[in-house]
Amino acid sequence: MKEIESNPPFEVLTYRKNRISLEALEDKFFFLIDEKEDKFSIYFKDEKYGVFLSYDSKGKEDKVNKVNKFLLPNCNSPINIETNGNSGIVIFFPLSKFNSRELNKKKINTVYGEIISKLRVNFSEDKSKMIVEINAIICLVSISLIESEKERIIDKIVSFIRENITNDKLSLDYVAQNLYMSKRKLQYIFSSNKTTYKKTLNEVKIDLLVYYINENPDVSIKYILSKCGFNSHSSASNAFKIAKGETLYQYKKKVRAS
């Protein structure tokens, strides 16, 4: 591992105001948390990099909690990290490929977090092997970020469908046109999320039916259907039965009784 030659757009200081030496791996930077230090401060010069933090934190009754989380840059004030003397790793990654403002709403995949925690508590003493292990962690973090971005895109698509559910023009082409993407790209996004436009549309309609019934179980189903994009009572009943395992009337009766 070689120390970076040029200064990155951030600085890391210990509680004693000592500057931390960062290591470079391509366009990422990292440092291993020293167990002798229990607090770090990160000072950002711009918002080009985000932070991934992984360490063990002792909670109540000395229960060990595995911390794996993203932190967004803040140029107005330092970000303080308290590790309480626990070992771990801090990785800085470029945000250019991701919608950084959405990352604070996302948590790293639980399975990835478990693997990352196992890797960083068993770092090899051999530096070349350690590089491989750290690269593996970086890959898992990158995959999680990509998945978070995919979730953000599909959430945007679902929101648009929901907002236009009563629009007669609503179709795959209409969604693609209004979200400024090709039909092929939109189909790819659905496919990569293991769904289709038709399935997503149907799920939105069912969710709206459930919402309106719960909001006012005394209102007629016929009145609700027009607000949920269904053209007929029979199609709504069939779709609801398949999705929920009970009829619309059974669900409405259950809600009214609760």
Image (tube, helix red, strand yellow):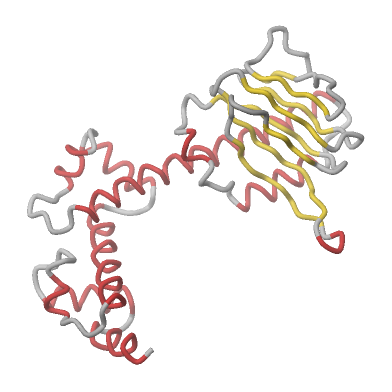
Give the side of residue 94 with respect to residue 166, left or right.
right
Counting labels gives 0
Q: Position of residue 163 (x, y in %)?
A: 22, 53
Left/right of residue 55 with respect to residue 197 in the rendered view: right
Residue at 85 percent across and 43 percent down: it is 86
Residue at coordinates 22% horizontally, 85% vertically from top-left? 218
Given residues 45 and 4, the one toward you in this image is 45
Residue 112 as seen in the image, left or right of residue 152: right
* Residue drawn at point x = 20 percent, y = 77 percent: 238
| For residue 23, above or below residue 133 | above
Residue 121 location (% of width, % of height): 82, 43
Q: Quadrant of residue 60?
A: bottom right
Q: Relative to residue 55, is residue 171 drawn left or right? A: left
Place residue 153 in its image quadrant: top left
Task: Give the residue at the far top of this rendering.
Answer: 5
**x then y, percent, for residue 129:** 80, 29
Q: Residue furthest bottom?
A: 257
Q: Is residue 181 above or below residue 167?
A: above
Quadrant for the N terminus in the image: top right
Q: Quick check: 258 above or below 135? A: below
**Outermost residue, front direction?**
76
Quarter of the image with the C terminus is bottom left
Residue occupying image coordinates x 47% and y 31%? 98
Q: Percent from the top left, x then y, of residue 112?
A: 63, 47
